[in-house]
């Protein structure tokens, strides 16, 4: 405990000293300007990506007037009258004029051959005009919202947000999918066929019935993708069929060599950051100054020693919330959240993983080993809310070393079926189904 207290003092002291040195060397107005200065070149990534450090809390989800809208997949039926909404915060500075553009993509997330007029009725250059300034926060920000327009074609889409007048000055990109169920997906989650993996993995068996589609060559024309908890980093792609029953117009995917297996993982760790005045769950302390809030989480240890968790989680997501003031979108503050995982050092990189890191691996969520503390540390700037996360080893076969992996774990699975007839310009998303395995009441 003494070492952890020293760690907290050191974590607070170093940024303060650096900030004082920064003010002494750089005029404040110049320092503020630099936060929004675009850096070039910015290479377009066909994935969920943020191109500037002051862009935070990017969310894309369907508007369904439900309490859990924000954690739902960014997937809609083309027949739906509902829309997707994009939200994000720009820390510091005043309103900036941002524009959005839609790019139609193939099943592998490369740009398709469809033109703008193939996918949209409107001109494909949308100003983002809905914005609000934060108030009462130690870190000021501008909150932006944009309603995604309806499209004419199914498939994968990428939202590209950029500064007005310069498409190369990228701000963020986000993926979403539009489907038209022209076939039926029968999917179940069961035990793995592997003897060793039976208690660790979850196996997705499924079949496709296509009474109204003229599929001539399933191997060439059908592409199946399965993802777990909205993740792309461990998604399964291009699963080949195990049998085709043309008389029944059915394609089966029943594997015996773990091709359709996911590690079940464990229920996610969590912390409650909805208040900065009282300690929420799994928060050890809160330190506030005029321009900064530091939140220290309770020390974490290996979950595998505790077995499978029985608490209810939100499958790696987070929900912005504020117990003191409304609306949470513009009154919730940003805090420097300090993570500490007690563990011997490992040869592989350790990451804090979840929607809070966009399910990606970079320096923002890469942990550093502290020999004095005998554990891993990292600090992330996060908006107030309820958060799920795990400690993850992507370079290790035992990726859930710190968490454990269990068949009983609740997970969301999505099955996406793409169809591309011979000679077609793009992939169509003709089937979508989702399953929550072992849903908690």
Image: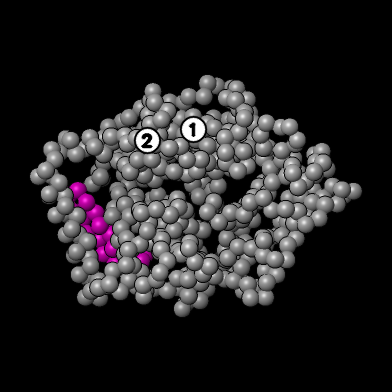
Q: Nearer the viewer, residue 25 or 1?
A: 25
Res. 161 visible in picture: yes
Residue 284, percent from left and from top: 29, 67
Residue furthest to the left in view is 24
| 281 in the magenta segment | yes
The residue segment tinted magenta is 279-297
Q: What residue is drawn where x is 31% and y is 52%?
A: 381
Give the structural element (helix, strand or loop) at label 1: strand
Residue furthest to the right in view is 247
Residue 39, relative to residue 305: is it above or below? above
The quarter of the picture where residue 94 lies is top left
Q: What residue is drawn where x is 43% and y is 33%?
A: 161
Q: Quadrant of the N terminus?
A: bottom left
| 135 in the magenta segment | no
Q: In the picture provided, is 214 more to the left or to the right than 82? A: right
Give the crowd class for mark 2: few <14, some 14-19, many >=20 residues within 10 Å: few
Residue furthest to the bottom in view is 305
The quarter of the picture where residue 74 lies is top right
The quarter of the picture where residue 58 lies is top left
Residue 174, percent from left and from top: 49, 40
Q: CA distance from mark 1 to mark 2?
A: 28 Å
Res. 323 visible in picture: no
Q: In the picture provided, is 269 more to the left or to the right than 102? A: left
Residue 213, percent from left and from top: 80, 39
Mark seen at residue 147: 1
Residue 199, percent from left and from top: 62, 74
Q: Nearer the viewer, residue 143 or 195?
A: 195
Q: Quadrant of the C terminus?
A: bottom right
Residue at numbered disc 2: 41
Q: What residue is drawn where x is 47% and y is 40%?
A: 45
């Amino acid at each position: 405990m003494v070492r952890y207290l020293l760690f907290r003092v050191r974590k607070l002291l170093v940024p303060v000293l650096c900030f004082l040195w920064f003010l002494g060397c750089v005029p404040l107005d110049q320092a503020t300007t630099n936060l929004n200065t675009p850096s070039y070149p910015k290479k377009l990534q066909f994935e969920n990506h943020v191109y500037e450090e002051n862009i935070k809390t990017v969310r894309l989800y369907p508007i369904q007037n439900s309490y859990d809208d924000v954690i739902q997949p960014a997937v809609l039926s083309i027949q739906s009258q509902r829309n997707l909404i994009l939200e994000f915060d720009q820390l510091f500075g005043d309103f900036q004029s941002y524009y959005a553009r839609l790019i139609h993509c193939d099943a592998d997330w490369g740009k398709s051959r469809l033109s703008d007029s193939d996918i949209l009725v409107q001109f494909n250059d949308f100003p983002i005009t809905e914005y609000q300034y934060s108030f009462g926060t130690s870190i000021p920000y501008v909150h932006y919202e944009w309603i995604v327009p309806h499209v004419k074609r199914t498939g994968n889409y990428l939202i590209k947000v950029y500064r007005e007048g310069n498409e190369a000055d990228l701000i963020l990109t986000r993926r979403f999918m539009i489907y038209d169920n022209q076939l039926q997906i029968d999917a179940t989650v069961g035990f793995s066929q592997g003897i060793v993996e039976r208690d660790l993995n979850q196996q997705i068996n499924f079949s496709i019935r296509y009474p109204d589609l003229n599929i001539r060559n399933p191997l060439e024309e059908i592409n199946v993708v399965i993802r777990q908890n909205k993740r792309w980093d461990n998604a399964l792609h291009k699963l080949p069929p195990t049998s085709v029953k043309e008389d029944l117009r059915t394609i089966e995917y029943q594997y015996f060599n773990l091709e359709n297996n996911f590690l079940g993982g464990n229920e996610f760790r969590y912390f409650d950051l909805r208040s900065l005045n009282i300690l929420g769950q799994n928060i050890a302390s809160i330190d506030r100054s005029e321009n900064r809030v530091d939140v220290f989480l309770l020390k974490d240890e290996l979950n595998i020693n505790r077995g499978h968790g029985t608490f209810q989680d939100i499958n790696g997501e987070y929900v912005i919330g504020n117990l003191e003031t409304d609306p949470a979108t513009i009154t919730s503050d940003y805090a420097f959240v300090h993570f500490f995982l007690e563990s011997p050092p490992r040869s592989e990189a350790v990451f804090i993983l979840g929607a809070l890191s966009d399910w990606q691996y970079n320096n923002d969520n890469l942990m550093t080993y502290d020999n004095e503390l005998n554990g891993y540390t990292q600090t992330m700037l996060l908006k107030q809310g309820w958060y799920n996360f795990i400690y993850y080893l992507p370079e290790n076969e035992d990726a859930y070393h710190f968490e454990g992996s269990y068949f009983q774990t609740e997970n969301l699975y999505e099955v996406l079926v793409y169809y591309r007839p011979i000679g077609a310009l793009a992939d169509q998303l003709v089937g979508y189904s989702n399953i929550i395995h072992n849903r908690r009441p």
